[in-house]
Image (spheres, grey):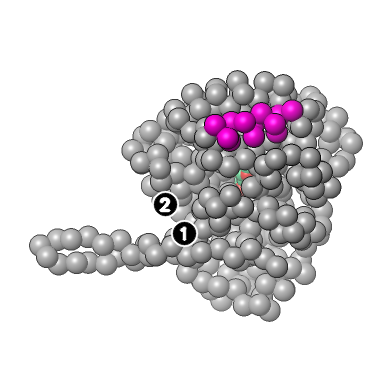
């Protein structure tokens, strides 16, 4: 069973002007939300900031994303850009309470999880985090999880979760700890759909968050798939919007990244059309079941990670 997500009643912006009320429809970006296993509501489309090395560009893209309607921002200690994300947030002038900020503790910091989270708070210029994830299932992630549990109980973090966890690691972590991860963030896109992961996550009420939902620019053939092109013509949407919509309709949270204003807007405007059941099945059939980026069960990937 796919998770249900709710539609917020904020489809219209209302402006009062000399007693005249004008309703302006915000085209295509009526955000939908997922309710996590601790009751917290999370936007189903967010903004990713991996590999935005230019500091000014990072700050500006976060600002643009918030302006375009994104409320979920996904960063990480390992991206080295939490400070710029914080500056972009400040620049936007948005009320902190409106945002859902996610960061991750790098596996090299698992022995110092508390200090790392406190440092993220400082970098991001906030006094709480909506979600903190363990970035990879490497090293002493049990110790790190127990520290995240404490920070969660102290109220410094509203939800805690994991990333790149295989279903067996997820079930193991859940079986021996107090707090269940709210989310598993894993590589998920048309060519790596992760249905097996999703079934296990559903069973344990862990939400599925897709990273690299557009293939990180490494599998651009997916934009040219005949079915994707056909659907993009039918719905007057871009192939990227079809790919993102497919995941969202499967109850998967997506966090596409872009530094271009037009793409930032495009990637969130996916709420004004719905793929049919047949179209969902057609896209499901295009799965290669092959991870390109996050393959932690591959020993050579673990070896490579040790050099990061
Ligand atoms: P992505 O799939 O979001 O791809 C981003 C790339 O897609 C862009 O650089 C651009 O080349 C292209 N693109 C963006 N919008 C487009 C559009 N509308 N049309 C055509 N092309 C477009 O890849 P990502 O950035 O690796 O993943 C998204 C986010 O997930 C990251 O920014 C990061 O926050 C997170 N992430 C997490 C992990 C993890 O280990 N937990 C790993 C990688 C990424």
- Magenta segment range? 143-154
Sequence order check, earlier mark of 1 and 2: 1
Residue ID for mark 2: 69
Which mark is in front, 1 or 2? 1
Q: What label sits on residue 31 in the rendered view?
A: 1
Q: Is residue 94 above or below residue 256?
A: above
Q: Is residue 60 above or below residue 121?
A: below
Query: Which one is in front, 156 or 243?
Result: 156
Q: Residue at x 10, y 62 (%)?
A: 18
Tell whether 163 sits left or right of 63: right
Residue 4, quarter of the rendered image:
bottom right
Tell whether 297 sits left or right of 273: right
Query: Which one is in front, 144 or 108?
Result: 144
Residue 143, quarter of the rendered image:
top right
Q: Main SS type for the magenta part?
A: helix
How far apart marks 1 and 2 lie (CA) works out to 8 Å
Say whether residue 194 is visible: no
Q: Residue at x 83, y 36 (%)?
A: 301
Specify the quadrant that holds the N terminus.
bottom right
Q: Residue at x 65, y 25 (%)?
A: 113
Is label 1 in contact with label 2 (beta carbons under 8 Å)?
yes
Q: Position of residue 68 (x, y in %)?
A: 41, 51
Q: Residue at x 60, y 20 (%)?
A: 115
145 inside magenta stretch: yes
Q: Position of residue 255 (x, y in %)?
A: 58, 49
């Amino acid at each position: 069973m796919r998770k249900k997500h709710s539609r917020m009643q904020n489809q219209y912006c209302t402006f009062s002007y000399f007693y005249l009320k004008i309703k302006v429809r915000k085209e295509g970006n009526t955000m939908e939300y997922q309710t996590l296993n601790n009751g917290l509501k999370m936007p189903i489309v967010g903004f990713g900031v991996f590999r935005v090395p230019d500091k000014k560009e990072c700050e500006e893209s976060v600002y643009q994303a918030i302006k375009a309607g994104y409320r979920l921002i996904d960063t990480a200690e390992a991206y080295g850009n939490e400070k710029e994300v914080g500056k972009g947030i400040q620049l936007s002038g948005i009320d902190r309470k409106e945002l859902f900020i996610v960061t991750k503790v790098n596996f090299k910091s698992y022995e110092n999880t508390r200090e790392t989270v406190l440092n993220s708070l400082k970098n991001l210029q906030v006094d709480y985090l909506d979600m903190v994830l363990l970035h990879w299932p490497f090293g002493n992630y049990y110790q790190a999880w127990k520290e995240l549990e404490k920070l969660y109980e102290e109220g410094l973090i509203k939800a805690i979760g994991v990333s790149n966890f295989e279903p067996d690691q997820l079930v193991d972590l859940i079986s021996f700890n107090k707090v269940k991860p709210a989310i598993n963030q894993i590589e998920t896109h048309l060519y790596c759909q992760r249905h097996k992961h999703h079934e296990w996550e559903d069973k344990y009420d862990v939400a599925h968050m897709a990273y690299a939902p557009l293939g990180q620019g490494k599998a651009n053939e997916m934009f040219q798939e005949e079915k994707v092109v056909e659907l993009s013509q039918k719905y007057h949407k871009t192939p990227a919007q079809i790919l993102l919509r497919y995941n969202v309709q499967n109850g998967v949270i997506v966090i596409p990244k872009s530094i271009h204003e037009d793409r930032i807007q495009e990637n969130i405007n996916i709420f004004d059309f719905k793929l049919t059941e047949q179209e969902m099945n057609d896209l499901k059939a295009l799965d290669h079941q092959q991870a390109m980026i996050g393959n932690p069960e591959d020993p050579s990937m673990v070896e490579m990670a040790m050099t990061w």
